[in-house]
Amino acid sequence: MKKPQKYKAQLSSEDDIWNAAVEAVSEMELPIEEGVNRNTFWAFQYYSAMESGGHESLLHAFFEYVQDIGTEQFLTELTAALDSIGAEHYARYERQYGKEMWYQFVALEHGETEEGAYYKVIEQADQAYYELGNSLEQVLAAHFVAVHEQLIDIMDA
């Protein structure tokens, strides 16, 4: 992956760093090797999906990837990423609800369960996420500040 380039002066505030980090993460494609890039990618993708439609959005966005690598591996990657950036509470909820959500999602796609069972677990997981407030955004912003030099080629003016 070619890292985006920014001049040091373009990264003078946390908002600038957030925007540059989002740009870098948006250019990443799966699969991603273990490390900062993978953790940052999953943490941001999780945050984005949750803020734009909750767990249902997350399930739809990564359905094909999960089909390729399996639910266990996906949840391992996701929860490891959340743990690595200091979002342990979110990782705990994904461990608690993740397998059942994916099971119900796939079962619903194949007509093997009722929508009610699927939405019950989705609503529980979403509620747990939203009860934590906006702490993930704050943790992610701090993470971006900590790792932005690994995500972006920074040039002197």
Image: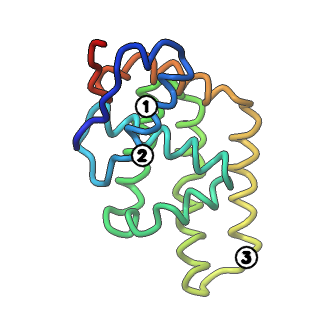
Q: Is residue 116 above or below residue 96?
A: below
Mark found first going from the N terminus, 2 or 1: 1
Q: Is residue 118 above or below residue 109?
A: above
**Residue 134 picture location, percent across and down:** 70, 29
Of residue 52 and residue 121, the one placed in the foreground of this image is 52
Q: Amino acid at mark 3?
A: Glu
- What is the crowding at mark 3: few (fewer than 14 residues within 10 Å), some, or many (at least 20)? some
Cβ–Cβ below 8 Å for labels 1 and 3?
A: no
Q: Amino acid at mark 1?
A: Ala
Which residue is depicted at the point 55% across and 85% down? Answer: 110
Which residue is depicted at the point 66% across and 26% down? Answer: 135
As drawn, is 12 to the left or to the right of 39? right
> What colouring method underlies this structural image?
rainbow
Of residue 92 and residue 3, the one placed in the foreground of this image is 3
**Residue 153 picture location, percent across and down:** 26, 26
Name the quarter where the C terminus is drawn: top left
**Secondary element type, mark 1:** helix
| Residue hosting label 1 | 21
Mark found first going from the N terminus, 3 or 2: 2
Whole-number angstrom distance, CA of label 2 to CA of label 1:
8 Å
Q: Quadrant of residue 155?
A: top left
Number of the label disc, if any, that sits on residue 120? none
Of residue 103 and residue 148, the one placed in the foreground of this image is 148
Q: Amino acid at mark 2?
A: Ser
| Residue hosting label 2 | 26
Whole-number angstrom distance, CA of label 1 to CA of label 3:
37 Å
Mark found first going from the N terminus, 1 or 3: 1
Number of the label disc, if any, that sits on residue 115? 3
